Image: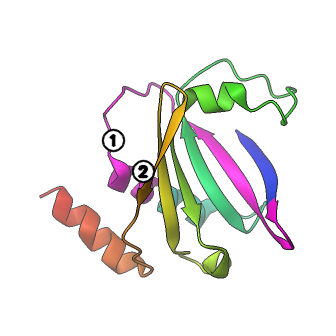
Amino acid sequence: MHTIKVCRGDNCGFAHTLMLSEYINGCFDQYDFIYISDKYLDSVSKYLPVAEITFVKPFDFQPYYDSEDDEPLTDNSIVSIWYTEETRMNKVPEIGHVTIYENGKSKSLDYLQVSVRKQRMEKYDTKNK
């Protein structure tokens, strides 16, 4: 729904914002979001490398709004997944941290980095048994 370029010094990537239709609070946990973001990474062919994927609740997004004014995005954010700079070009980049949003406030979580997709999916499959 929305993509912006983000840079730290000379290292740049793109932040992708994805709107979830019909989202109900608490219906996913961080592993569910990681699973969805992995599937999304498989489909990305433009705006690479992906530095971050943020999931937002449904809201009336105005595509012409000034991207410097990110308050509507922050207010509706659910979770952001940040990829490490060193692995952004990998097919399955490592996750540096996960940020959870509640009422527009953010809280970063440490994330056990698992760079191999098979290991990530094993974690996900184990959780759902």
Q: Mark 2 Cα within 10 Å, few/some/many (few <14, many 20+)?
A: some
Q: Nearer the viewer, residue 19 or 52?
A: 52
**Residue type (three-letter) at the residue carrying disc 2:** Phe
Q: Quadrant of the N terminus?
A: top right
Occupied quadrant, residue 23: top left
User: Is 15 displayed left or right of 28 in the figure?
Assistant: right
Tell me which segment is drawn in magenta: 7-36
Q: Position of residue 116 (x, y in %)?
A: 42, 82
Which residue is under mark 1? 28
Occupied quadrant, residue 18: top right
Disc number at residue 75? none
User: Is 30 displayed left or right of 82 in the figure?
Assistant: left
Which residue is under mark 2? 33
Residue sitting at x 51%, y 28%: 21
Occupied quadrant, residue 64: top right
Which residue is at the far left?
Answer: 129
Residue sitting at x 57%, y 27%: 76
Q: Position of residue 47 (x, y in %)?
A: 78, 60
Dot 2: element: helix
Dot 1: element: loop
Residue sitting at x 57%, y 60%: 82
Report if the CB atoms under discs 1 and 2 are less than 8 Å apart.
yes
Q: Is residue 23 magenta?
A: yes
Figure check: 93 above or below 54: below
**Residue type (three-letter) at the residue carrying disc 1:** Phe
